Amino acid sequence: MKKFFALLTAALLFMGGGVHAEGALRADETWELVRRAYVFSFPLVLMDATMKAGTNTLRPENGRAPVNQAGHARTLATARFRQVVTPNVDTLYTQVFFDLADDALVILKPAADRYLTFQVMDAWSDTVAMLGTGADTMDERVYLLTGPGFDGKIPEGMTRVEIPTNIGWIIGRTVCFGPEDLENVYDLQARMDVRTLALYLSGEEQPEGTYVPENDGIPFRMAVGMGPKAFFDRVNELLVLNPAYPGDAEEMKAFAAIGVGPGLVFDPAVLGDGAGEHWQAMIAALPAELTASSASFLIDNGAFRFMGGPIGRFGKEYDYRALVAVGGFGANPADAAVYMRAGTDDEGAELSGRYSYTLHFGPGELPPVMENGFWSVTAYGDDDFLIDNPIDRYAVCDRTAFALNPDGSLDILVQADEPAEGKDNWLPVGKDAFHLFLRIYLPQAQVLDGTWHAPSIVKR
């Protein structure tokens, strides 16, 4: 059976598809459309699942908030954080899941003496705007997010941001310089304001949200755990108020043949016998297939690799959009931040907590960033979550009190056990497989064009 699926997948990669003259789809044509439709719409379904989990609360608390309200993280992410894979520990998150079907949304960004951004994503996970990373970083700004049906008046002093879908996600990131800096971040959070235009103008209190126990899952698992009918039924519902882009018309026309489209009805009978097994095999094969088809966007630098453009602004690169959803949902565009991943050492061997490693930056080769930029190296387990450790250290960064070598180089000690010397340079990992992320916020051009060299990873 595995051989059959492997052969089928290989064949589908080279098929052009099509419809018989009599109008019926062959089984292989049906499954090709199913795969294409799944890849195309997975970010939409994951956004919906992430929104359900992130707004599953009566009032703002623990980083969650009802729809159209801001939820602020009050502590840096730890191994107990499970809402988003590969979370960073450099910033305190502010999250807003918005629904613009009934009203526009006001966002007040306070003046800041540091990196403070709002990444605004639509329902498809495309980054529509980055608020705060340009000339307005230091200034207070008031923005008005409007959905596709908005026809109201823009109040004076507000900058309009047009969103092509009704639902979406805002990730605010405020850099924190350590536990002693938390109160300063809290002050910035208190000066943020997110509310519907009607509430902003009236001054009325924010409404209470809702809590549904079954929405308390991990969003990614919720999305990939759906069967074909549940998945495409939800897609069809979401498409009504969150349309595909005009450039996606050809794909949407093709998907209609299997009942996928706004307001359509998906009939699982079109999948034939053995649909459940085939569906699971399709999903299991996707990560490797998406990585292969997106290879031209994956940029290698030593043992590290990062997702380059068009990350965050995907256009018709549907495979790449799905790959980013699987591997780092909500990732910044590359010009805002680069996330370099390493799963092997310089010899190509998989990283494992059974060994000790030295992550070495040469003299003058610490990551180059623009004003207000910063960098960090973070370790994750093979489940893409932070690794529990006795000193609650999940990253070494430009704010860590590490010791440089006499020549100005930096050695970060990546290992499970506390080193006899150099504890300030220690990045703890578990005893199992792990990988590293080197994050560079506001990277300089040499990071993007590859003229800067990432650190080496040497087994000791």
Image (cartoon, rainbow, N blue to C red):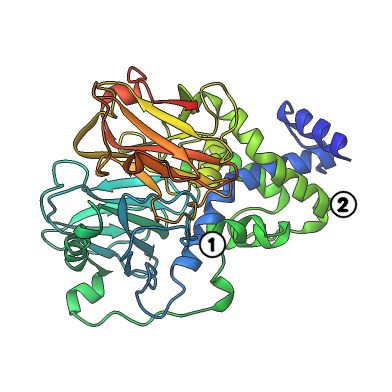
Residue 64 in the image: above or below residue 81: below
* Image coordinates for residue 458, horizontal then vertical, percent: 48, 25
Among the 4 quarters of the image, the one containing residue 108: bottom left
Q: Residue at x 37, y 42 (%)?
A: 332
Task: First in sequence, mark 2 or 1: give its number.
Answer: 1
Among the 4 quarters of the image, the one containing residue 285: top right
362 with respect to 323 (left or right): left
Q: Callout 1: few (<14), some (14-19), or many (20+) C-alpha neighbours within 10 Å? A: many
426 with respect to 242 (left or right): left
166 with respect to 279 (left or right): left
Marks 2 and 1 sit apart, C-alpha to C-alpha, by 27 Å
Q: Callout 2: few (<14), some (14-19), or many (20+) C-alpha neighbours within 10 Å? A: few
* Image coordinates for residue 281, horizontal then vertical, percent: 77, 45
Among the 4 quarters of the image, the one containing residue 236: bottom right
Residue 220 in the image: above or below residue 346: below
Q: Callout 1, which amino acid?
A: Ala
Q: Residue furthest top?
A: 451
Q: Residue at x 85, y 39 (%)?
A: 2
Q: Which residue is mark 1?
A: 49
> Is there any visible trace of residue 377 in the rendered image?
no
Labelled disc at residue 274:
2
Q: Callout 2, which amino acid?
A: Gly
Question: How many circles with numbers are drawn on the protein?
Answer: 2
Quadrant assignment for the N terminus: top right
Labelled disc at residue 304:
none
Residue nearest the viewer, comparing 148 with 42: 42
Q: Secondary structure at mark 2?
A: loop
Residue 152 in the image: above or below residue 19: below
* Image coordinates for residue 162, horizontal then vertical, percent: 31, 52
Q: Residue furthest front?
A: 420
> Is there any visible trace of residue 360 in the rendered image?
yes
Residue nearest the viewer, comparing 438 with 356: 356
